[in-house]
Image (cartoon, grey):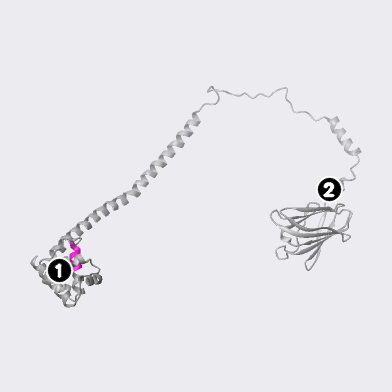
Amino acid sequence: MLALTELGGRLRAAREEKGISLDQLQSMTKIQKKYLSGIEEGDYSQIPGKFYVRAFIKQYAEAVGLSADELFEEYKNEIPAAYEDDLSEQLSRVQTRRTVSARTSKIAELLPKILIGVAIVAVLFLIWYFFSKNVDTGKQPAGNGKDQSVDIKESDEIKTPEPNPDKKEKAESKEENDPQDPNEDTENAEQELAMDNVSGNVTAYNLSGTDKFELKVSAAASGETWVKILDGNNQELFQGMLQNGASQSFDLSDQNSAYIIIGRAFETDIHVNDQKLEYELDPVQHVTQEISIKFDKE
């Protein structure tokens, strides 16, 4: 310990020569005062780990203006011994880590093979399961397990009925004698709702081919719109908001026209005799529109 005591005395002398107290040195090096005092006294037993002895001596020397390398060379007979012991301990730890890493690496190499093996076993099991299930289903007897056969015999009692010529003649005679319903043509006649012209936001339509004029104006299922409806005499039939599928219906069969003012065309549906009116103007680009329908009654 003589060399270390001499090293401690040299460090202390340099510190005192610069007028630095142990408290000040502790603040400068961030090393606890008891460790600094131990270095000066040559007592390293309180320093945690032999590796820190060399590091603390180096910081002490640099703080008081001495060369750490020169001190280590001058007192190498003592200081390196403590360092080499710690180095052996670190090498042992590195070797342990390498051993653990090697084991981990082997496990990592084996893991894909293990997973592939498990997958193969699972696939083979599924193949066996479905194969055995299909075989059991094919062997399962039907009914009560006895062979059964069904004989299909043509019954003499079931015969395709022959057409009765008398009934056929009566039906044809009835079709010739019965007068045709005069309303049949009217009911089957197809109405025509055609666009006539467009002027600004006003679109004119013609309704023909029918004697019925039923108008229905409704809002979209989850929307709202404002509408105003006038009859052929310019009399107001409705004015207000329609929301969430609400509608207004009118029978205008005795009128010659109808006029509809729409606030939100893209959320407004118009039906004429259950036929939906198709907007000539894009209802998204032309939100406000006016629709004129002229009725040419049959």
- The residue tagged 2 is 188
SS under mark 1 = helix
User: Which residue is drawn at the image coordinates 11% and 66% (left, top)?
Assistant: 78
Q: Residue furthest left?
A: 2
Residue 51 in the magenta stretch? The answer is yes
Q: Is residue 44 left or right of residue 120?
A: left
Q: Which residues are magenta?
A: 50-56
Residue 133 in the magenta stretch? The answer is no
Badge 2: few (under 14), some or many (20 or more) residues near its Cα, within 10 Å?
few
Q: Is residue 115 left or right of residue 270?
A: left
First reached walking from the N terminus: tag 2 or tag 1: 1
Badge 1: few (under 14), some or many (20 or more) residues near its Cα, within 10 Å?
many
Residue 15 position within the rendered picture, expressed as x and y whole percent measured from the top left: 17, 74
Residue 265 position within the rendered picture, expressed as x and y whole percent measured from the top left: 74, 61
Viewer-closest of 222 and 283: 222
* Residue type at numbered disc 1: Glu
Q: Which mark is residue 40?
A: 1
* Residue type at numbered disc 2: Asn
Q: Is residue 15 left or right of residue 150?
A: left
Viewer-closest of 186 and 162: 186
User: Which residue is drawn at the image coordinates 20% and 73% (left, top)?
Assistant: 21
Residue 139 position within the rendered picture, expressed as x and y whole percent measured from the top left: 49, 29
Viewer-closest of 16 and 266: 16
Looking at the rendering, which quadrant does residue 67 occupy? bottom left
Which numbered disc, 2 or 1, marks the residue closer to the eye? 1
